[in-house]
Amino acid sequence: MNALAARRRHPAAIAVLLLLGLLVTGGAYSFLAPKDANAAAPTAAADDVAQGKDLFIANCATCHGVAAQGTKSGPSLVGVGAASVDFQVGTGRMPLAGPNVQAPQNKVKFDDAQISALAAYVASLGPGPAIPEEKYTTVIEPGTPENNKAIAEGGQIFRVNCAMCHNFAGAGGALTRGKYAPALEGTTPKHIYEAMVTGPQSMPVFNDMNLTPEAKQKVISYLKAQENETNVGGLTLGNLGPVSEGLFAWVFALGILIGCAVWLGKKAA
Amino acid sequence: MSTINETRPADALRSGDRQADERASATKPLGGIAGWMDDRLGGAKGVSFLAKKVFPDHWSFMLGEIAMYSMIVCLLTGAFLTFWFVPSASQVVYDGSYVPLQGVTMSDAYRSTLGISFDIRGGLLIRQIHHWAALIFVVSVFVHMARVFFTGAFRKPREINWVFGTILSLLACIEGFAGYSLPDDLLSGTGIRAMNGFIQSAPVIGSYLSYFIFGGAFPGEAIIPRLYSAHVLLIPAILVGLFTAHILLVFLHKHTQFPGPGRTNKNVVGYPLLPVYIAKAGGFFFIVFGVIALISAVVTINPIWAYGPYDPSPITAGSQPDWYMGFADGALRLLPGFLEFETFGFTWSMNIFPGSLVLLPLMWTIIGVYPFVEAWVTGDKREHHLLDRPRNAPTRTAIGIAGISMYVVLFLAAGNDLMAIKLHLSINDITQTLRVLFFVAPPIAFWITKRICLSLQRADRQKVLHGRETGTIWRHADGRFEEIHAPLTPDERWVLVQHEAHEPLELTAGKDANGVDSPIAGKERLRAKFSNFYFRDRVAPATPSELEAAHHEHDDHAAVPDGGHEAIEPAGASQERETIKADKQHG
């Protein structure tokens, strides 16, 4: 006890205490936090629709109703199509972790076979957008002049239709009342395509009438090309525009320069 | 008259003069190039005056230097950029090396900026240095301004220089705005669109003014060349001219200094410009340039290639101006839309007008006139070369913090969308909260700051009268505990007692013998009210007699027999430092 008492005024004491507190809190949280329910999904079903229905009843029916007709807590899924299920479940947005203004991207709870079974079941309820053909979700790689042109066109389509919510670099943006347009980086081409045709959450639907499948492919290719571009300027500061630049100037640039000024002011002549 | 120089008897009368001449030439030590230059330019006197000029040392006096150097960096890199930048809105097809834009139609201004960024060797680095230096320039201008404000360096005789500085800071913002509007990328075009909206919000004449400035309908082809002229010619010329005057006035007034032993209103304690200060300042230039270059080499600023070319139809989420225009953008975001109305066939855009055309001039006017307001309130006509410690001018400090809090609320509002995403909040709630805070935060900030200042003053007073708390607890033989207080050295004490605490002005011009109000009575009453507001709460610095009294009290106490006195004294403490003890009775 004496040794502890002697060190309690040590300059590092506060830092050590803080660290200890954080460790204990974090440890306790990871121990007590709710775990994913290990709902065993039926594995051996004769056909996808039947398996999908079983999965649906077990995981989705609470909110969407036993016949996917919708309840007060969740919309009807009749006619939303396979693309919608593939997007919502494939990005972990569904099943919803908890009621909120918007379903956040989350850990994916099902494997590919289960997702396609669910999608097949929901698609069987009524006609809706299907999972896109692979030729439209293949990224056009830059290199040849016509590919470069396609990517540049994708950029123009993106700026006109998408940048107002998703930001010029696809870094995401705010919508009203806590809703938001998520960041697009790291999203698979298939999911981007599906989001465009199904319009999840606050997003409008871009059907094949206003954006052809080829145009959607160009947008996706532009996003991927931008993602793969070397950051020629250095750190991007999150591609959030002048706000993060201003913050950087105030905190780091001014901080460093004042540090230098203090050092120089202290230097004897 | 003969040109032959022959000695005449009368010359003897002037022999003393000749010696004076010789002496004068003997004391002129300049030889070599310096002498040659002086013979032709006669600069020696001025140079030696400048070289002997003394500057006080303090890190906060270098904030203005950061501004000066980053401005020089901007000028140098800006000249480089003009070699390739084409200020033209004419449309061309991009065929440079940035793939995601190849084949896109864009303005020549944007094409040439892309060229500087991707195809000119070192172009991107210079562009980033230019932009970072500009941000840092305005940051340091504002911080320098805050330093001058909170230390009272704007008082007589420096009011005019404060006004110059105020104009300089406004010009710096306008210059920055003009610059970031030039590349004609999506973001800068959006900025020009916002400016267009500002102009149109002027009642009645708005649309005419907009057509006049844009040379037709928005966006037109005229605005980029016009902004370019303003950015590279007009504003820099005024900026550099005014800045030179700003610096000359510093030389003329001499630099202010923080209070300290030996520092008075009539001297400057520091180092001469040559060789000490010139080395420090010159070195600091390279430090500033180096830090800016380092930041520019590793951190992207304004990735114009990612924004794409400007086109009035698209917009990007997170459209904000550079930080120094953020407060105006924030004001627009906070102003409720229902303020717009129509009468007599005119639209009165009161949802935009107060946050733009009113806010900018208003803010800088308030800043500019402050020294005159304070001088009038205090009635102080003396010159001040010694700075105030901010705590010793509680009301001024509190006014400053209140103003800054108002500014910060507007500033934060400009980033409401990013705060909403990053902090998982509702943008509507943030906006509503900031609307309330705009009115509530300043009084709270004022009150808290003033209380903190007064408490610090009281703490100073305690420290002077009872010494510094050593943290050493001492137990007496009779079981009493007390903390050892170490007295201050005279030097330390001086800083804490040198200031004067103003008292509220008394009314002098009242009624005359016949009960008639003096003609200036109304004005005087107002002034007395203001003076009361400023100086009602005051903590007087400890006077010598109070100090003496405190000492006696302690000495009486020290007469109580005590043991181990010497042992408690920290090793190496000077003999002059007598240990004063203060217990609860007079602690």
Image: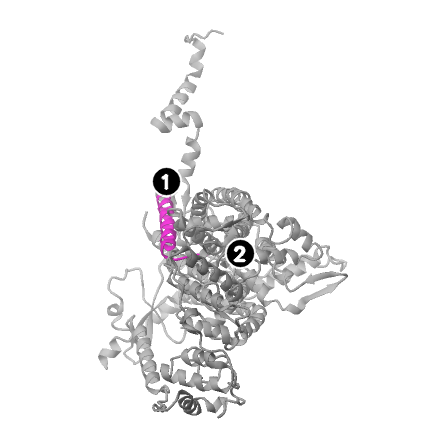
Magenta residue span = B277-303
Residue density around tag 2, few if under 14, some if 14–19, many if 20 or more, within 10 Å = many
Q: Residue B24, can we see it?
A: yes
What's under tag 1, amino acid-wise? Leu
Residue matched to label 2? B310
Residue matched to label 1? B274
The mark lying in front, picked from 2 and 1, is 2
User: Per the image, is B155 magenta?
Assistant: no
Above or below, comparing residue A173 to residue B33 in the picture: below
Q: Residue at 41% of width from left, 69% of height from top?
A: A135
Image side of residue A51 versus residue B310, left or right: left
Q: Nearer the viewer, residue B448 or B270?
A: B448
What's under tag 2, amino acid-wise? Tyr
Q: Which chain letter goes with mark 1? A: B
Q: Residue at 64% of width from left, 68% of height from top?
A: B337
Image side of residue A49 versus residue B436, left or right: left
Q: Which chain letter goes with mark 2? A: B
